[in-house]
Image (cartoon, rainbow, N blue to C red):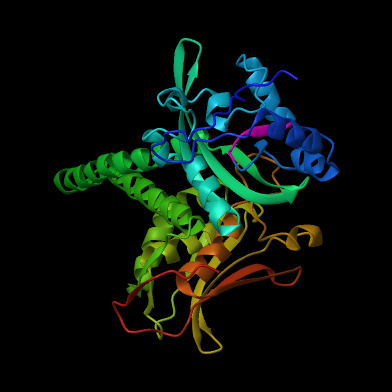
Amino acid sequence: METGVLEQREEPRATQFAPADRASIETLCTQLDRVINDPIVKTLLESLGGYVVIINQQRQILTASAELRDLLLANGCENFVGMRPGEALGCVHATTAENGCGTSAQCSHCGAVIAILAAQCSDMPVEEECWITLRRQDTIENIEFRARATPLSACGADLMVLVLHDISSHKRRAVLERKFLHQTRNLLSGIVTWSEVMEQESSTEASRTIRDLAFQLRDLIVRQSVIDQAEKGQLIVRREKVPYDCLVTALSATFSHLASSEDKQLVFHPNRAIPYVISDRNILLSILGNMVENAIEGTPKGGTIHIRHELFHGQPSFLVSNPGVMPEQVAERIFQRSFSTKGEPGRGMGTYTMRLLASQGLAGEVYFTSTPKDGTIFRVVLPAHEPQGSAKPAINR
Protein backbone atom coordinates (compact mmCIF):
# COMPACT_ATOMS: atom_id res chain seq x y z
CA MET A 1 0.00 0.00 0.00
CA GLU A 2 1.39 3.37 -0.99
CA THR A 3 1.22 5.89 1.83
CA GLY A 4 2.35 9.38 2.71
CA VAL A 5 4.73 10.20 5.58
CA LEU A 6 5.56 6.76 7.02
CA GLU A 7 9.27 6.87 7.79
CA GLN A 8 10.27 5.76 11.30
CA ARG A 9 13.67 6.24 12.93
CA GLU A 10 15.13 4.45 15.93
CA GLU A 11 16.60 7.52 17.63
CA PRO A 12 14.30 10.16 19.29
CA ARG A 13 13.43 13.00 16.97
CA ALA A 14 13.98 16.65 17.74
CA THR A 15 10.94 18.84 18.32
CA GLN A 16 10.11 22.32 19.55
CA PHE A 17 6.59 21.42 20.65
CA ALA A 18 4.69 18.16 20.12
CA PRO A 19 6.32 14.71 20.11
CA ALA A 20 7.97 14.02 16.76
CA ASP A 21 8.05 10.21 16.64
CA ARG A 22 5.87 8.37 14.15
CA ALA A 23 4.48 4.85 14.09
CA SER A 24 6.42 2.20 12.23
CA ILE A 25 5.19 1.18 8.79
CA GLU A 26 4.05 -2.18 10.16
CA THR A 27 2.05 -0.58 13.00
CA LEU A 28 0.53 1.98 10.71
CA CYS A 29 -0.55 -0.62 8.16
CA THR A 30 -2.13 -2.72 10.91
CA GLN A 31 -4.02 0.28 12.30
CA LEU A 32 -5.12 1.29 8.81
CA ASP A 33 -6.44 -2.19 7.99
CA ARG A 34 -8.49 -2.27 11.19
CA VAL A 35 -9.82 1.26 10.87
CA ILE A 36 -11.08 1.06 7.30
CA ASN A 37 -13.05 -2.09 8.15
CA ASP A 38 -14.52 -0.83 11.42
CA PRO A 39 -18.26 0.01 11.20
CA ILE A 40 -18.06 2.54 14.05
CA VAL A 41 -15.34 4.52 12.31
CA LYS A 42 -17.27 4.39 9.06
CA THR A 43 -20.39 5.74 10.78
CA LEU A 44 -18.41 8.57 12.42
CA LEU A 45 -16.92 9.66 9.12
CA GLU A 46 -20.31 9.67 7.44
CA SER A 47 -22.18 11.37 10.30
CA LEU A 48 -19.92 14.21 11.40
CA GLY A 49 -19.94 17.48 9.47
CA GLY A 50 -16.79 19.33 8.49
CA TYR A 51 -13.39 17.87 7.66
CA VAL A 52 -12.92 14.69 9.73
CA VAL A 53 -9.79 12.58 10.19
CA ILE A 54 -9.02 9.58 12.36
CA ILE A 55 -5.46 9.83 13.69
CA ASN A 56 -3.29 7.60 15.83
CA GLN A 57 -1.32 8.52 18.96
CA GLN A 58 1.47 9.92 16.79
CA ARG A 59 -1.07 12.28 15.15
CA GLN A 60 -0.81 10.45 11.80
CA ILE A 61 -3.87 10.22 9.57
CA LEU A 62 -5.36 6.77 9.09
CA THR A 63 -8.53 7.70 7.22
CA ALA A 64 -10.64 10.77 6.45
CA SER A 65 -14.17 11.79 5.56
CA ALA A 66 -15.19 11.96 1.91
CA GLU A 67 -15.38 15.76 2.13
CA LEU A 68 -11.77 16.02 3.27
CA ARG A 69 -10.56 13.39 0.83
CA ASP A 70 -12.05 15.40 -2.02
CA LEU A 71 -10.32 18.55 -0.78
CA LEU A 72 -6.96 16.84 -0.43
CA LEU A 73 -7.28 15.24 -3.86
CA ALA A 74 -8.11 18.61 -5.42
CA ASN A 75 -4.96 20.02 -3.81
CA GLY A 76 -2.81 17.25 -5.22
CA CYS A 77 -2.49 15.20 -2.02
CA GLU A 78 -3.51 11.68 -2.99
CA ASN A 79 -1.54 9.64 -0.45
CA PHE A 80 -2.35 11.24 2.90
CA VAL A 81 -2.21 8.08 5.05
CA GLY A 82 0.60 8.46 7.58
CA MET A 83 0.77 12.21 7.15
CA ARG A 84 -0.15 14.57 9.95
CA PRO A 85 -3.10 16.96 9.38
CA GLY A 86 -0.95 20.03 8.70
CA GLU A 87 1.19 18.13 6.21
CA ALA A 88 -1.80 16.85 4.28
CA LEU A 89 -3.53 20.23 4.22
CA GLY A 90 -0.36 22.06 3.15
CA CYS A 91 0.33 24.17 6.25
CA VAL A 92 3.44 26.26 5.59
CA HIS A 93 4.80 25.53 9.08
CA ALA A 94 4.73 21.78 8.52
CA THR A 95 7.84 22.16 6.37
CA THR A 96 9.78 24.59 8.59
CA ALA A 97 10.85 21.86 11.01
CA GLU A 98 12.70 18.69 10.07
CA ASN A 99 10.10 16.43 11.69
CA GLY A 100 6.99 18.00 10.27
CA CYS A 101 3.59 19.03 11.58
CA GLY A 102 3.48 19.85 15.28
CA THR A 103 7.22 20.08 15.84
CA SER A 104 8.09 23.66 14.89
CA ALA A 105 8.02 26.65 17.23
CA GLN A 106 5.03 28.05 15.33
CA CYS A 107 3.10 24.82 16.01
CA SER A 108 2.87 25.76 19.69
CA HIS A 109 0.23 28.29 18.63
CA CYS A 110 -1.77 25.85 16.49
CA GLY A 111 -5.20 25.17 17.99
CA ALA A 112 -5.45 21.78 16.26
CA VAL A 113 -2.20 20.48 17.76
CA ILE A 114 -3.07 21.97 21.16
CA ALA A 115 -6.50 20.30 21.10
CA ILE A 116 -5.03 16.91 20.16
CA LEU A 117 -2.37 16.99 22.90
CA ALA A 118 -4.87 18.19 25.52
CA ALA A 119 -7.38 15.51 24.57
CA GLN A 120 -4.66 12.84 24.80
CA CYS A 121 -3.75 14.03 28.32
CA SER A 122 -7.28 14.45 29.63
CA ASP A 123 -8.99 11.65 27.69
CA MET A 124 -11.78 14.18 27.10
CA PRO A 125 -12.94 16.12 24.02
CA VAL A 126 -11.10 19.43 23.59
CA GLU A 127 -12.03 22.27 21.25
CA GLU A 128 -9.78 25.12 20.11
CA GLU A 129 -9.70 27.70 17.35
CA CYS A 130 -7.01 27.13 14.78
CA TRP A 131 -5.44 29.55 12.28
CA ILE A 132 -3.69 27.72 9.44
CA THR A 133 -1.63 29.29 6.68
CA LEU A 134 -1.89 27.01 3.65
CA ARG A 135 0.14 26.97 0.49
CA ARG A 136 -2.02 26.38 -2.59
CA GLN A 137 0.43 25.91 -5.48
CA ASP A 138 1.71 29.50 -5.93
CA THR A 139 -0.68 31.20 -3.48
CA ILE A 140 -0.90 31.54 0.29
CA GLU A 141 -4.31 31.17 1.96
CA ASN A 142 -5.22 31.82 5.59
CA ILE A 143 -8.06 29.70 6.97
CA GLU A 144 -9.56 29.71 10.44
CA PHE A 145 -10.89 26.43 11.77
CA ARG A 146 -12.68 25.31 14.89
CA ALA A 147 -10.79 22.14 15.80
CA ARG A 148 -12.34 19.50 18.06
CA ALA A 149 -10.30 16.48 19.13
CA THR A 150 -12.13 13.53 20.71
CA PRO A 151 -10.43 10.36 22.04
CA LEU A 152 -11.65 7.15 20.41
CA SER A 153 -10.92 3.65 21.68
CA ALA A 154 -11.50 1.42 18.69
CA CYS A 155 -9.78 -1.18 16.55
CA GLY A 156 -7.62 -2.24 19.49
CA ALA A 157 -5.87 1.15 19.69
CA ASP A 158 -6.20 4.59 21.27
CA LEU A 159 -7.14 6.82 18.36
CA MET A 160 -8.40 10.36 17.98
CA VAL A 161 -11.22 11.91 15.96
CA LEU A 162 -10.23 15.36 14.73
CA VAL A 163 -13.00 17.51 13.24
CA LEU A 164 -12.17 20.80 11.51
CA HIS A 165 -14.95 23.31 10.79
CA ASP A 166 -14.04 26.21 8.51
CA ILE A 167 -15.13 29.37 10.37
CA SER A 168 -13.21 31.84 8.20
CA SER A 169 -16.29 33.52 6.73
CA HIS A 170 -17.91 33.79 10.17
CA LYS A 171 -14.79 35.42 11.60
CA ARG A 172 -14.42 37.82 8.69
CA ARG A 173 -18.07 38.81 8.95
CA ALA A 174 -17.76 39.44 12.69
CA VAL A 175 -14.74 41.70 12.16
CA LEU A 176 -16.46 43.60 9.35
CA GLU A 177 -19.61 44.03 11.43
CA ARG A 178 -17.67 45.45 14.37
CA LYS A 179 -15.73 47.80 12.11
CA PHE A 180 -18.85 48.85 10.21
CA LEU A 181 -20.84 49.56 13.39
CA HIS A 182 -17.97 51.52 14.92
CA GLN A 183 -17.49 53.70 11.85
CA THR A 184 -21.23 54.12 11.37
CA ARG A 185 -21.69 55.29 14.96
CA ASN A 186 -18.93 57.85 14.53
CA LEU A 187 -20.38 59.20 11.29
CA LEU A 188 -23.92 59.19 12.66
CA SER A 189 -22.84 61.10 15.75
CA GLY A 190 -21.65 63.89 13.48
CA ILE A 191 -24.86 63.81 11.41
CA VAL A 192 -27.03 64.02 14.53
CA THR A 193 -24.99 66.93 15.92
CA TRP A 194 -25.10 68.95 12.71
CA SER A 195 -28.77 68.18 12.12
CA GLU A 196 -29.54 69.70 15.54
CA VAL A 197 -27.42 72.75 14.70
CA MET A 198 -29.22 73.15 11.37
CA GLU A 199 -32.61 72.86 13.10
CA GLN A 200 -31.66 75.55 15.63
CA GLU A 201 -30.30 77.96 13.01
CA SER A 202 -33.01 77.53 10.36
CA SER A 203 -36.06 75.64 11.52
CA THR A 204 -37.67 74.37 8.34
CA GLU A 205 -39.58 71.26 7.43
CA ALA A 206 -36.49 69.92 5.67
CA SER A 207 -34.21 70.49 8.66
CA ARG A 208 -36.70 68.89 11.04
CA THR A 209 -37.05 65.88 8.73
CA ILE A 210 -33.28 65.43 8.49
CA ARG A 211 -32.98 65.64 12.29
CA ASP A 212 -35.78 63.11 12.83
CA LEU A 213 -34.30 60.71 10.27
CA ALA A 214 -30.88 60.97 11.94
CA PHE A 215 -32.45 60.12 15.32
CA GLN A 216 -34.33 57.19 13.77
CA LEU A 217 -31.17 55.81 12.20
CA ARG A 218 -29.32 56.17 15.49
CA ASP A 219 -32.03 54.27 17.37
CA LEU A 220 -32.13 51.58 14.68
CA ILE A 221 -28.37 50.98 14.96
CA VAL A 222 -28.58 50.88 18.75
CA ARG A 223 -31.44 48.36 18.58
CA GLN A 224 -29.53 46.10 16.21
CA SER A 225 -26.39 46.31 18.35
CA VAL A 226 -28.37 45.33 21.45
CA ILE A 227 -29.82 42.28 19.67
CA ASP A 228 -26.38 41.21 18.46
CA GLN A 229 -24.91 41.48 21.96
CA ALA A 230 -27.81 39.48 23.45
CA GLU A 231 -27.39 36.62 20.98
CA LYS A 232 -23.67 36.45 21.80
CA GLY A 233 -24.31 36.52 25.55
CA GLN A 234 -22.43 39.83 25.86
CA LEU A 235 -25.30 42.10 26.79
CA ILE A 236 -24.55 44.61 29.54
CA VAL A 237 -27.56 46.10 31.36
CA ARG A 238 -27.50 49.69 32.63
CA ARG A 239 -30.62 50.47 34.61
CA GLU A 240 -31.76 54.03 35.09
CA LYS A 241 -34.93 56.06 35.46
CA VAL A 242 -36.59 56.05 32.03
CA PRO A 243 -39.55 58.48 31.71
CA TYR A 244 -42.54 57.19 29.79
CA ASP A 245 -42.61 60.42 27.75
CA CYS A 246 -39.04 59.68 26.59
CA LEU A 247 -40.16 56.30 25.27
CA VAL A 248 -43.18 57.83 23.54
CA THR A 249 -41.02 60.44 21.82
CA ALA A 250 -38.56 57.85 20.51
CA LEU A 251 -41.23 55.38 19.35
CA SER A 252 -43.34 58.11 17.77
CA ALA A 253 -40.37 59.52 15.85
CA THR A 254 -39.47 56.09 14.53
CA PHE A 255 -42.86 54.61 13.72
CA SER A 256 -45.52 57.33 13.32
CA HIS A 257 -44.47 58.05 9.74
CA LEU A 258 -44.40 54.32 8.90
CA ALA A 259 -47.88 53.80 10.35
CA SER A 260 -49.40 56.84 8.67
CA SER A 261 -47.91 55.87 5.30
CA GLU A 262 -49.92 52.64 5.52
CA ASP A 263 -53.10 54.44 6.65
CA LYS A 264 -52.69 53.25 10.24
CA GLN A 265 -52.54 55.18 13.49
CA LEU A 266 -50.43 54.96 16.64
CA VAL A 267 -52.14 55.97 19.88
CA PHE A 268 -50.16 56.31 23.11
CA HIS A 269 -51.99 56.07 26.43
CA PRO A 270 -49.92 57.68 29.21
CA ASN A 271 -50.40 56.54 32.78
CA ARG A 272 -49.64 59.60 34.92
CA ALA A 273 -49.58 57.43 38.03
CA ILE A 274 -46.52 55.63 36.59
CA PRO A 275 -44.44 58.40 34.98
CA TYR A 276 -41.24 56.33 34.64
CA VAL A 277 -39.77 52.86 34.89
CA ILE A 278 -36.38 51.71 36.18
CA SER A 279 -34.86 49.88 33.24
CA ASP A 280 -32.25 49.96 30.48
CA ARG A 281 -33.48 52.53 27.97
CA ASN A 282 -31.87 50.98 24.87
CA ILE A 283 -32.97 47.42 25.65
CA LEU A 284 -36.51 48.51 26.54
CA LEU A 285 -36.77 50.60 23.36
CA SER A 286 -35.57 47.61 21.32
CA ILE A 287 -38.32 45.45 22.81
CA LEU A 288 -41.03 48.07 22.39
CA GLY A 289 -39.81 48.92 18.90
CA ASN A 290 -40.21 45.30 17.83
CA MET A 291 -43.64 45.16 19.46
CA VAL A 292 -44.81 48.28 17.60
CA GLU A 293 -43.30 47.18 14.29
CA ASN A 294 -44.94 43.78 14.61
CA ALA A 295 -48.28 45.45 15.42
CA ILE A 296 -48.07 47.73 12.38
CA GLU A 297 -47.47 44.72 10.13
CA GLY A 298 -50.45 42.90 11.66
CA THR A 299 -52.89 45.82 11.46
CA PRO A 300 -55.23 46.20 8.48
CA LYS A 301 -55.47 49.56 6.71
CA GLY A 302 -57.45 52.07 8.72
CA GLY A 303 -56.63 50.23 11.96
CA THR A 304 -55.18 51.63 15.19
CA ILE A 305 -52.28 50.42 17.31
CA HIS A 306 -52.49 51.20 21.04
CA ILE A 307 -49.45 51.49 23.32
CA ARG A 308 -50.04 51.47 27.08
CA HIS A 309 -47.95 51.56 30.26
CA GLU A 310 -49.57 49.99 33.33
CA LEU A 311 -49.04 47.79 36.34
CA PHE A 312 -49.59 44.07 35.79
CA HIS A 313 -49.96 42.12 39.04
CA GLY A 314 -47.95 44.84 40.77
CA GLN A 315 -45.15 44.89 38.16
CA PRO A 316 -44.53 47.58 35.52
CA SER A 317 -45.53 46.49 32.04
CA PHE A 318 -46.01 47.80 28.53
CA LEU A 319 -48.53 46.45 26.08
CA VAL A 320 -49.05 47.00 22.38
CA SER A 321 -52.35 45.95 20.83
CA ASN A 322 -53.72 45.86 17.31
CA PRO A 323 -57.00 44.60 15.82
CA GLY A 324 -55.39 41.83 13.75
CA VAL A 325 -55.75 38.16 14.72
CA MET A 326 -53.06 35.51 14.30
CA PRO A 327 -53.92 32.11 12.83
CA GLU A 328 -53.42 29.35 15.38
CA GLN A 329 -50.53 27.76 13.49
CA VAL A 330 -48.72 31.12 13.52
CA ALA A 331 -49.38 31.73 17.22
CA GLU A 332 -47.87 28.34 18.11
CA ARG A 333 -44.51 29.31 16.57
CA ILE A 334 -44.49 33.06 17.15
CA PHE A 335 -41.34 33.16 19.31
CA GLN A 336 -39.23 30.84 17.15
CA ARG A 337 -36.13 32.43 15.66
CA SER A 338 -36.50 33.22 11.95
CA PHE A 339 -40.10 31.99 11.79
CA SER A 340 -42.07 34.33 9.56
CA THR A 341 -45.35 34.31 7.70
CA LYS A 342 -43.74 36.48 5.01
CA GLY A 343 -41.51 33.73 3.63
CA GLU A 344 -38.68 36.20 3.04
CA PRO A 345 -35.01 35.81 4.13
CA GLY A 346 -34.13 37.87 7.19
CA ARG A 347 -37.69 38.04 8.50
CA GLY A 348 -39.08 36.52 11.70
CA MET A 349 -36.68 38.12 14.18
CA GLY A 350 -39.05 40.62 15.81
CA THR A 351 -41.00 38.44 18.23
CA TYR A 352 -37.95 36.28 18.89
CA THR A 353 -35.88 39.29 19.96
CA MET A 354 -38.70 40.61 22.16
CA ARG A 355 -38.45 37.52 24.38
CA LEU A 356 -34.65 37.26 24.09
CA LEU A 357 -34.05 40.82 25.28
CA ALA A 358 -36.77 40.75 27.94
CA SER A 359 -35.43 37.58 29.58
CA GLN A 360 -31.68 38.08 29.14
CA GLY A 361 -31.55 41.83 29.53
CA LEU A 362 -34.35 42.91 31.84
CA ALA A 363 -35.21 39.73 33.80
CA GLY A 364 -38.73 40.13 32.43
CA GLU A 365 -41.11 38.18 30.24
CA VAL A 366 -43.16 38.70 27.10
CA TYR A 367 -46.72 37.40 26.78
CA PHE A 368 -49.30 37.62 24.03
CA THR A 369 -52.92 36.85 23.30
CA SER A 370 -54.72 36.87 19.97
CA THR A 371 -58.51 36.62 19.85
CA PRO A 372 -61.25 37.93 17.54
CA LYS A 373 -62.64 39.95 20.44
CA ASP A 374 -59.48 41.77 21.60
CA GLY A 375 -57.20 41.42 18.58
CA THR A 376 -53.51 40.73 19.21
CA ILE A 377 -51.87 42.00 22.39
CA PHE A 378 -48.17 41.73 23.24
CA ARG A 379 -47.15 42.59 26.79
CA VAL A 380 -43.68 42.88 28.31
CA VAL A 381 -43.67 42.59 32.10
CA LEU A 382 -40.65 43.93 33.99
CA PRO A 383 -39.47 43.21 37.54
CA ALA A 384 -40.44 45.64 40.30
CA HIS A 385 -38.36 48.81 40.42
CA GLU A 386 -34.75 48.40 41.49
CA PRO A 387 -32.50 51.14 42.88
CA GLN A 388 -31.69 53.73 40.24
CA GLY A 389 -28.30 53.45 38.56
CA SER A 390 -27.69 49.76 39.20
CA ALA A 391 -25.78 47.97 36.48
CA LYS A 392 -25.04 44.32 35.96
CA PRO A 393 -24.22 41.91 33.14
CA ALA A 394 -27.12 39.98 31.71
CA ILE A 395 -27.52 36.38 32.85
CA ASN A 396 -27.37 33.82 30.06
CA ARG A 397 -30.09 31.21 30.23
Residue at (74, 72) in percent of width and height: 373
Instruction: Give the residue drawn at x 56%, y 88%.
Output: 313
Task: Work out which residue is located at the far left of the displayed protein and give it.
Answer: 201
Report whether residue 338 is seen: no
User: Is residue 173 part of the magenta span, yes or no?
Assistant: no
Q: Position of residue 397 (x, y in %)?
A: 55, 69
Which residue appears farthest toward the front when viewing the image?
Answer: 10
Residue 236 at what x, y percent from top left?
38, 64
**What is the tally of numbered marks visible in this picture?**
0
**Who's the residue at 48% across and 36% down the image?**
12
Q: Please tell me which residue lies in front, 272 or 293.
A: 293
Give the image quarter of residue 185: top left
Q: Nearer the viewer, residue 17 or 234?
A: 17
* x then y, percent, for residue 332: 76, 63
For the N terminus, the quadrant is top right
Q: Nearer the viewer, residue 275 or 150?
A: 150
Q: Which residues are magenta?
A: 58-65
Whether 61 is among the magenta residues is yes
Looking at the image, the residue that sits furthest to the top is 138
The answer to whether residue 52 is seen in the rendering is yes
Q: Is residue 29 positioned above or below 263 on the image?
A: above
- In the image, residue 283 above or below residue 20: below
Question: Looking at this view, is 219 or 54 the one in front?
Answer: 54
Q: Position of residue 50 (x, y in %)?
A: 65, 37
Give the residue furthest to the bottom: 314
Instruction: Name above or below for residue 348 compared with residue 273.
Output: above
